[in-house]
């Protein structure tokens, strides 16, 4: 039902785009399609985790269609990156999601920061959401760069699908819209898409404990202590695509999204029996904690001037 609703929303957005033609009202379509693309990203995530199909081949085919063809993001590159994140969440050296490329996620990273991370890290809390407007484009650029890496299993296939996506995407925009309106459409669509993705993924781990090199934790504690659940009912479930049950998702990564809510009750009770901290908070509170963490870890850079 969820995938069907997203497919209908995508078809409706494309239809509205074609009907409106060369009009500034297309910016509303761009905003709506940013939400649809965010949901497509969540669908690709579920396919990569084999939450939809139990077998590898259908999962890969679905992932390539959703990620490469519809989103313009490499399924193989993202899956490799995300697998490493799941194995070592919030690990300073092993989790690619907290690599100090642009932002710093710990005081140790701040002290060692160089280049853009050293400059941006001083004010990274204030710059976090503005930087998210570039995340959609960053995913696509990273996908193209990854095609030359030995870890890519099907670089020709993935590259062909990525090129096909952008030929249709930009071809359609500049065929229907004037150049100025087409560029405005891209800015609104990609900017809001990046903010949406960041708003879904940031609350899950940002602001939770960072794991230093040499720290030994068992699987349960490694996953629970570094993850945060986000409460909010049906609306938050839909907005975050089930990733608001982040603790359960990390413990049972192939568990289908509809089952995570039931698993949450069992998991929280079990953690209480063990005396293991189990973090739950609201959506806005989770963002406040993440931004507070970014400001706190960037303090050494501000002191350094």
Image (cartoon, rainbow, N blue to C red):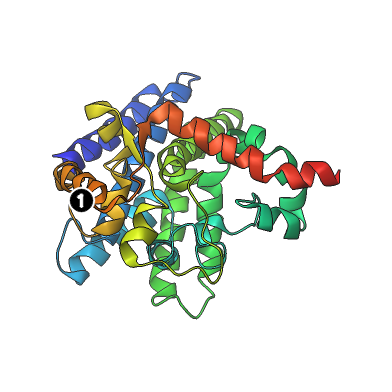
Mark 1 crowd level (few <14, some 14–19, many ≥20, 10 Å Cα):
few
Q: Which residue is depicted at the point 50% across and 63% down?
A: 95
Q: Which residue is depicted at the point 54% across and 45% down?
A: 135
Comparing 70 with 164, the one in front is 70
106 horizontally vs 263: left or right: right
- In this rendering, is residue 188 above or below 94? above
- In this rendering, is residue 151 above or below 204? below
279 horizontally vs 209: left or right: left
Q: Quadrant of residue 80?
A: bottom left
For the C terminus, the image quarter is: top right
- In this rendering, is residue 190 above or below 19? below
Q: Position of residue 227 (x, y in %)?
A: 39, 49
Q: Which residue is depicted at the point 31% across and 61% down?
A: 220
163 horizontally vs 121: left or right: left
Q: Secondary structure at mark 1?
A: helix
Residue placed farthest to the right in the image? 305
Q: Quadrant of residue 74?
A: bottom left
Comparing 85 with 153, the one in front is 85
141 horizontally vs 277: left or right: right
- In this rendering, is residue 14 above or below 276? above
The residue labelled by disc 1 is 270
Q: Quadrant of residue 36?
A: top left
């Amino acid at each position: 039902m969820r995938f069907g609703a997203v497919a209908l929303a995508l078809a409706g957005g494309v239809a509205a785009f074609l009907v409106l033609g060369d009009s500034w009202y297309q910016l509303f379509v761009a905003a709506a399609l940013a939400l649809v693309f965010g949901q497509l990203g969540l669908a690709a995530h579920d396919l990569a985790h084999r939450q939809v199909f139990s077998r590898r081949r259908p999962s890969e085919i679905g992932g390539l269609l959703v990620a490469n063809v519809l989103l313009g993001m490499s399924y193989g590159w993202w899956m490799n990156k995300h697998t490493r994140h799941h194995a070592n969440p919030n690990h300073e050296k092993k989790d690619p999601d907290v690599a100090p490329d642009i932002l710093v996620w710990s005081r140790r990273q701040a002290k060692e920061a160089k280049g853009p991370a050293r400059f941006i890290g001083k004010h990274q809390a204030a710059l976090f959401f503005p930087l998210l407007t570039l995340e959609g484009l960053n995913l696509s650029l990273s996908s193209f760069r990854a095609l030359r890496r030995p870890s890519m299993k099907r670089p020709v296939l993935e590259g062909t699908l990525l090129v096909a996506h952008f030929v249709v995407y930009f071809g359609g925009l500049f065929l229907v819209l004037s150049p100025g309106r087409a560029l405005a459409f891209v800015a609104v669509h990609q900017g809001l898409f990046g903010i949406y993705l960041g708003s879904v993924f940031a609350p899950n781990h940002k602001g939770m404990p960072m794991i230093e090199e040499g720290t030994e934790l068992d699987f349960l504690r490694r996953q629970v202590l570094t993850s945060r659940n986000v409460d909010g009912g049906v609306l938050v479930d839909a907005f975050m695509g089930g990733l608001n049950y982040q603790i359960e998702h990390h413990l049972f990564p192939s568990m289908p999204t509809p089952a995570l809510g039931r698993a949450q009750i069992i998991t929280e009770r079990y953690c209480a029996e063990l005396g293991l901290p189990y973090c739950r908070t609201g959506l806005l509170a989770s963002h406040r904690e993440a931004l507070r963490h970014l400001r706190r870890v960037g303090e050494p850079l501000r002191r350094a001037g």
